[in-house]
Image (cartoon, coloured by chain):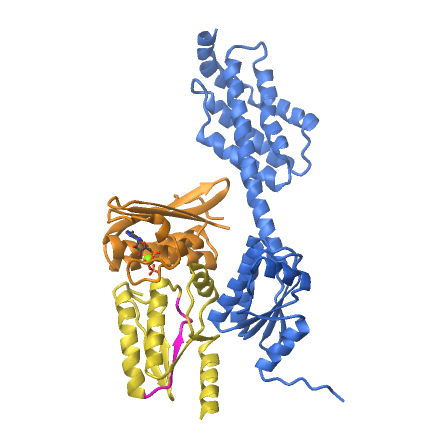
Chain colours: A orange, B yellow, C blue
Amino acid sequence: MRPAARPIRTTVPVHGEESLAAAHRTVDEAGQALGYGLVDQTKLVTAASELVRNIVLYAGSGQMEVEELSRGGQSGLRLTFTDQGPGIPDVGRAMQDGYSTGKGMGLGLPGARRLVHEFSIDSAAGSGTRVTIVLWRR
Amino acid sequence: MTAATPPSAHIIPLDGILVVTLPPLLGDSDAEHLAEQVGERLVAEQAHAVLIDMAQMRMIDSHMGRVLNVMASMIRMLGAETMVAGLRPEVAMTMVELGMDLGGIRAALSVRHGLADLRARAGRSE
Amino acid sequence: MKAAAMPFLHDLAPASLLSERQRLLTVWRTYLGDYLPMPQIDHRIVQDLCEGLLDAFTEALGTAPPVMTEGLRDLLSALSVEFAERGLTPSQTATFVFSLKHVLNEAFSGGSGAMEDIHKLVDAMGLYSVDAFIGRREQIIRRQSQELVDLSVPVVPLWEGVLSLPIIGTLDSSRAQAITEKLLFEIARSGSRYAILDISGVPTVDTQTAQHLAKTVAAARLMGAECVITGIRPAIAQVMVSLGINLSSIETRFSLAEGLRYCFGKLNYTVIQGG
Ligand SMILES: Nc1ncnc2c1ncn2[C@@H]1O[C@H](COP(=O)(O)OP(=O)(O)OP(=O)(O)O)[C@@H](O)[C@H]1O
Ligand SMILES: [Mg+2]
């Protein structure tokens, strides 16, 4: 078990492609501190990469928050991706495999959802987007 | 390692096969230039195959997947074959969960396996 | 009554508990020996827990109304972890904490209105310890079931370059996950190009199981290995067809032997019968 250190809590500003590497490093370090297995660690970093890239591509800038969670003797990380961009008019469609308004494969959102234990998205046209994911340590 | 410049891809020609070694994480600008670089070397070396060594890659997201697929299509157009080698188990599992596949790109367990495979096939078709 | 009792509580209670510390600890020990024997735990540990708890409790009584302090919480957590690990039950854990009431009754015989507040604090302590106990117990159970899952995934090398994975029992999702991981890491470690997944020991295959098999095969393919699924019984094949499960992109064979023959063919091995 992790020695009782201060719970992990950081925010990474996202303002362009350069932010991807920083976001990646932050999630990687937090995941290692929490003690995920290799597979879960890779899944979380990949999900974060998808969501940060969406901010860069569709909103231009925003932020990623990383928080440690503990619930009923279980610990995990919650990652919150927030932007004030154009928002998603039809969230239902955006969550479907293969739907992309750009030249992507349309896998980022639905794929990220499959990689984690909890996923929620809050977005509407004109009011920005917030995506929250949680991965518990097995 | 310093944060200044992330390591980029290495390309080594090996009798007719272009071995491309990718770093743990490929920065976006490197990824963008990868296909172009590989295409130029492919033509210059008159290679018949490109073997992409993925053993170091720690993560492949949908963006990286697209970069690989675009590169493979380009290689096919130039009359050569693409093979990926050494994809890690955790990366493979994550790609599948994400919903990504590498289309028709063939895969090998390691560069050694891949080279043996490509050579055997080249020998057969001669 | 209550208002008058307050000064008694935070002025006198800690003082009388302090002065009678040794006697109360003896009372407590005797009580526990009679009503809550815990042979699983070393008596010195019990002694330490009692002393620590009584001291932290005495300190908590210094405020009015008495509230749970950080020190009490830490001690109760430690106590619950100890009890959970030694295989005691949540009710034994709570009974232990509640036995403090007996000690307090000894200390304040004659009774007073302040006892109500003291009882409330002890009750809160009991509940807290049960929560902490259950949290710890869940952790232990989770770890043990993970160990069981790991044990039940045998990846057997059949031949150079050919692994086999006999899957026995129901494939729930955490087990399926563990099996996939184990197989893929073993493929990478051993450099095996073929893996035979034998499902003759799987009682039923539902959509989720089939989906999981398909994902495992897809991941292995990305790594450069091919999977063959064997041991699909006719009844299971029928169910799969009626569920609309399609494994047509996956190599399947009836028996493990047929699966091995397929791999040998791919590896250009010829099986010759000795004369
Ligand atoms: N933060 C965001 N702000 C505004 N629109 C977004 C945001 N994230 C996603 N979208 C919209 O949702 C669509 C689907 O996103 P998703 O990540 O699933 O696919 P993609 O980015 O188009 O392709 P891929 O991620 O596979 O490269 C996007 O095409 C875009 O229109
Ligand atoms: Mg995307």
**Quadrant housing residue C236:** bottom right
Q: Where is residue A32 in the image (x, y as percent from the top left)?
A: 42, 55
Residue at (66, 70) in percent of width and height: C254
Is residue C162 found inside the magenta-colored segment of the image? Answer: no
Occupied quadrant, residue C62: top left
Q: Residue furthest right?
A: C275
Q: Which residue lies furthest to the bottom in this view?
A: B126
Quadrant of the image containing the C terminus of chain C? bottom right
Is B50 drawn above or below residue C116 in the view shown? below
Of A97 and A119, the residue lying toward us: A97
Q: In this view, does A48 lie to the left or right of C224?
A: left
Q: Is residue A57 left or right of residue C272?
A: left
Q: In this view, does A114 lie to the left or right of A127?
A: right
Q: Is residue C9 above or below residue C239?
A: above
Q: Is residue A25 visible?
A: no
**Residue A121 visible here:** yes
Residue at the limit of the structure toward the front, as seen here? C242
Residue sitting nearer the eye, C225 or C39: C225
The foreground one among A126 and A35 is: A126
Closest to the observer, B95 or C16: B95
Q: Residue at x 70, y 26 (%)?
A: C34
Residue B92: image x %, image y %? 46, 65
The number of numbered discs placed on residues in the rendered structure image is 0
Residue A51 image position (x, y, % from top left): 33, 54
Q: What stretch is highlighted in magenta?
A: B46-57
Image coords of residue C50 (percent x, y): 57, 29
Ligand 2 - quadrant of the structure image? bottom left
**Looking at the image, residue C56 lies above or below residue B93:** above
